[in-house]
């Protein structure tokens, strides 16, 4: 609620001010409509004077009342009423200034070139009508219309300057928020690297020390320790990759290298078959990240749950899609097989507009198949 209040209050304030000024214009028009204005023998009241004066007065007063909602219409209508009175040979009253009041709003609400275009015809017909009345009326009318134009143009310039200032302040605020976010991401990356990186490095170091201490004994234990070292180093590489996502420009992934590195960390008793299409071509970074995580999760599930002896990984391009296939020859399913990891895998793929299925394979085992648009973002 509080986040929207600073934005809504100025809008409401502008609307309220606009309504108040329209009410003032309507009040002025009403007072002018019922009170004769001008010499005692020539009035511009709706209820007094010749018929043409009454009709012109109605138009003038309507133009005064409607100059804010429809300034161009008000300008043309009031100018037409002034010309009609002059053409009828009737004296003009000071209410012919209604065109000047409308001109102020035209200049205020439109860009200068367009405002000049809108005002050209009405002013061009009003000034000769005033000149037909008297030179004094022409001079006063010209000065009044010029002042009206300058006042409206100045108001528009102030409004544009204020809008430019608000836009500049908004852009500066966005830049400050962006820099703050980048600083926070950098801080998180440093904290994660220092904390997790230290723990994994210590683990890898101890595994290496234990392997070396065995010498030539217990080959199977040395192999397991070697794989712990390899997995630890791979985890550090993954950590660097994840931390790179916190940066403004995440690093790109080489899918061939990533997949082979993941397969290399599998236990030694698993036989692996890898088929990676050499023509994968360019894929977006989000797609590469998702391919990495899908294959990683599928292989992790095989190690945890499958009791398999063979793992097959396929990665190729089918027209505009990247196709992933990971299968094994272990147990087809179990109570823990389709869990949180598979749900997360599906979410990643669906977020990019792809499809992901996981289930028992043929003739046995478990398989994961995913298809992701290569250019998804």
Image (cartoon, rainbow, N blue to C red):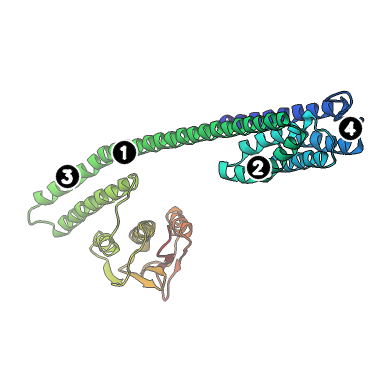
**91 lies left or right of 137:** right
Question: In terms of sequence position, does the residue under pointer 4 or pointer 2 come before the other?
Answer: 4
At horizontal 61% and vertical 42% (from top left) the residue drawn is 115
Residue 231: x and y in percent read: 24, 53
Q: Which mark is residue 206?
A: 3
Q: Nearer the viewer, residue 106 or 160?
A: 106
Residue at the disc numbered 1: 186
For label 2, the SS is helix
User: Which of the marked residues, 4 or 1, is nearer the chain's N terminus?
Assistant: 4
In the picture, measured across the screen, residue 171 lies left or right of residue 206, that is right
4 vs 3, front mark: 4
Determine which residue is flagged by label 4: 46
Q: Residue furthest left?
A: 215
Q: Position of residue 376 (x, y in %)?
A: 43, 60
Ranked by sequence position, the earlier of labels 2 and 1 is 2
Residue under label 2? 119
């Amino acid at each position: 609620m509080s986040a929207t209040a600073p934005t809504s209050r100025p809008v409401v304030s502008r609307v309220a001010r606009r309504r108040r000024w329209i009410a003032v214009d309507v009040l002025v028009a009403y007072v002018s409509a019922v009170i004769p204005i001008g010499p005692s023998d020539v009035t511009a009241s709706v209820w007094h004077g010749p018929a043409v004066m009454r009709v012109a007065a109605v138009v003038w007063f309507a133009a005064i009342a409607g100059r804010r909602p429809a300034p161009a219409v008000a300008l043309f209508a009031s100018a037409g009423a002034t010309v009609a009175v002059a053409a009828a040979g009737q004296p003009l009253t000071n209410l012919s200034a209604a065109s000047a009041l409308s001109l102020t709003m035209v200049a205020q609400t439109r860009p200068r070139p367009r405002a000049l275009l809108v005002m050209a015809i009405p002013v061009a017909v009003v000034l000769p009508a005033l000149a037909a009345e008297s030179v004094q009326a022409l001079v006063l009318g010209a000065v009044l219309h010029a002042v009206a134009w300058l006042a409206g143009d100045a108001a528009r310039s102030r409004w544009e300057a204020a809008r430019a200032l608000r836009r500049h302040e908004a852009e500066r605020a966005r830049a400050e928020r962006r820099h703050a976010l980048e600083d926070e991401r950098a801080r998180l990356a440093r904290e994660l690297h220092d904390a997790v990186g230290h723990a994994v490095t210590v683990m890898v170091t101890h595994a290496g020390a234990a392997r070396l201490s065995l010498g030539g004994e217990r080959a199977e234990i040395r192999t397991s320790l070697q794989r712990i070292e390899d997995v630890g180093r791979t985890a550090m590489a993954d950590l660097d990759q994840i931390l790179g996502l916190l940066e403004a420009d995440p690093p790109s992934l080489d899918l061939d290298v990533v997949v082979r590195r993941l397969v290399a960390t599998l236990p030694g008793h698993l036989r692996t078959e890898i088929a990676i299409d050499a023509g994968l071509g360019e894929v977006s970074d989000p797609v590469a990240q998702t391919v990495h995580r899908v294959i990683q999760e599928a292989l992790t599930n095989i190690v945890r749950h499958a009791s398999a002896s063979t793992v097959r990984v396929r990665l190729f391009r089918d027209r505009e899609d990247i196709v992933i296939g990971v299968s094994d020859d272990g147990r087809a399913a179990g109570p823990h097989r389709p869990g949180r990891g598979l749900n997360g895998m599906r979410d990643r793929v669906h977020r990019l507009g792809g499809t992901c299925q996981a289930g028992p394979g043929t003739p046995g085992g478990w398989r994961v198949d995913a298809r992701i648009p290569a250019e998804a973002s």
